[in-house]
Image (cartoon, rainbow, N blue to C red):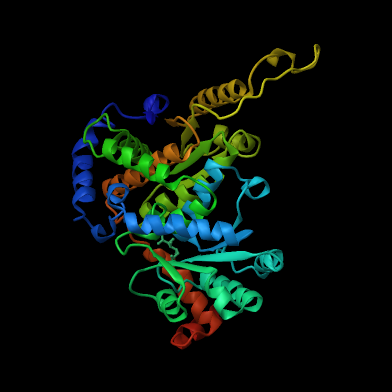
Amino acid sequence: MLQFDVSHALPFLPKNWLSSRLDGLTDSRALLEKGNGVGGEFTGWVRLPENYDRKELARVLQTARIIRDQSQVLIVVGIGGSYLGARAVLELVTSPNYNLFCKGPQVFFTGNTLSSDALNELLDYVRDKDFSVNVISKSGSTTESSIAFLLFRQLLEEKYGKAGARDRIFATTDWHKGTLRALANQEGYATFSVPGSIGGRYSVLTAAGLLPLAVAGIDVEELLAGAADAMVRLRQPGQDNPAWQYAAARHALYTEGKNIELLACYEPSFRFFGEWWKQLFGESEGKDGRGIFPASVEFTADLHSMGQYIQEGERDLFETVVRFTLPASTCTLTPTPGDHLDFLRGKDLRYVNEQARRGTVLAHVDGGVPNLLLSVDERTAYWVGQLIYFFEYSCGLSGYLLGVNPFDQPGVEAYKENMFALLGKPGYEEKRKKLESRC
Ligand code: PA5
């Protein structure tokens, strides 16, 4: 059961933190459900778990089998919303060490950097391996992913010839428009779609996430089933709705001066889920001079690096802890008598981790850091599907409560414009002159 617990934030919240926001939440819910708010043309994700294209899912599953049969490695090329969701789910459901233990193809993510060292390392790694490429870009023209795709496509063509490469390239992009769509049509690559009504950071439950995940052997139908069950539950209006509670608590804490939200988890495999969540909330809320700054920490590791700041630094933080109540494996501790860990004899590591969580919450609350707790049962595809939908829906509600468009990202263009000008892209000549004089 997905459960939200606000009790360790209550000392920091006004009594009416939820009741005073019920009208705003009712309005926000209506905007999401009807798709008629600002940015409403990008609310296709709201009903996606029940509306998804069954035929496309069948093709995703069939293609995943082909890729598994023909490849030792799958290279996933994408950036931002075109890779974070897939990597988050892959690592959370399996392990950050997936590539060491996987039974099927290894999965590497690239196209999210302009580092020649990073790209050359991966090109060298796959040079003598059978590999396939899933290039993911909704716009089809993002610089980082276009460059990585160029390099891996050239390597595929060198290894397998143009026709052989064609059988190993899978493009996920807009159905109708964009540079990648045009290239895929021209070259005859197999293609999958990111629906026009779903923005990158809300696209993990489309082929953008599902194809790489299916290649990794993750049960994507269970992922969708978890999201569908969360959708049915979270659609119910009212103060018992955990997404309403989360959105209201965040908004109330922000109003009380808590400008930074730390997403924490006691499972190392959660790290990239934190990265996905940061993009989701950061791009959705951070605009018009407003928004909670989303950060993430991995406990207990970061208690030994960030713990001091969290406990005693600026008091403008709150924490949201994600807890998996049923860890998959056990590990009983058997220290030798007299060992300094003797007090843990017979204890399971799950119990130790849980006491670390309980002790940390109380310490942080005593230090002035409100704590929100979100619990789900297991790190399985089903429960991760629930988590994804919970955060997406809460994010939509939160953005509307804050009074911003939760579905655009105009600020992302600023660096691109400067980069294109400095690189000498045609059309940017005037801007280049101005920038060069400032550099
Ligand atoms: O959320 C978003 O829209 C962005 O983060 C995009 O996903 C990211 O910029 C990649 O864009 P594209 O898929 O067009 O390559």
Provide residue 234's location: percent of width, then percent of height. Answer: 28, 38
Q: Position of residue 413 (x, y in %)?
A: 42, 69
Is there any visible trace of residue 236 in the rendered image?
Answer: yes
Q: Quadrant of residue 284?
A: bottom left
Residue 237: x %, y % from top left: 21, 36
| Left or right: 296 in relation to 117 | left
Residue 382 or residue 255, whichever sits in front: 382
Question: Could you tell whether 381 is left or right of 29 in the image?
Answer: right
Vertical arrangement, residue 105 with respect to residue 155, above or below: above
In what quadrant does ligand 1 lie? bottom left
Residue at the spot x=34%, y=61% of the render?
A: 408
How many labels were placed on the picture? Answer: 0
For the N terminus, give its image quadrant.
top left
- Asked if one can make out residue 109 in the rendered structure from this viewpoint, the answer is no
- Tell me which corner region of the image, top left, top right, bottom left or bottom right, holds residue 60: bottom left
Q: Give x and y (percent) for residue 262.
A: 49, 40
* Quadrant of the rendering where the C terminus is positioned: bottom right
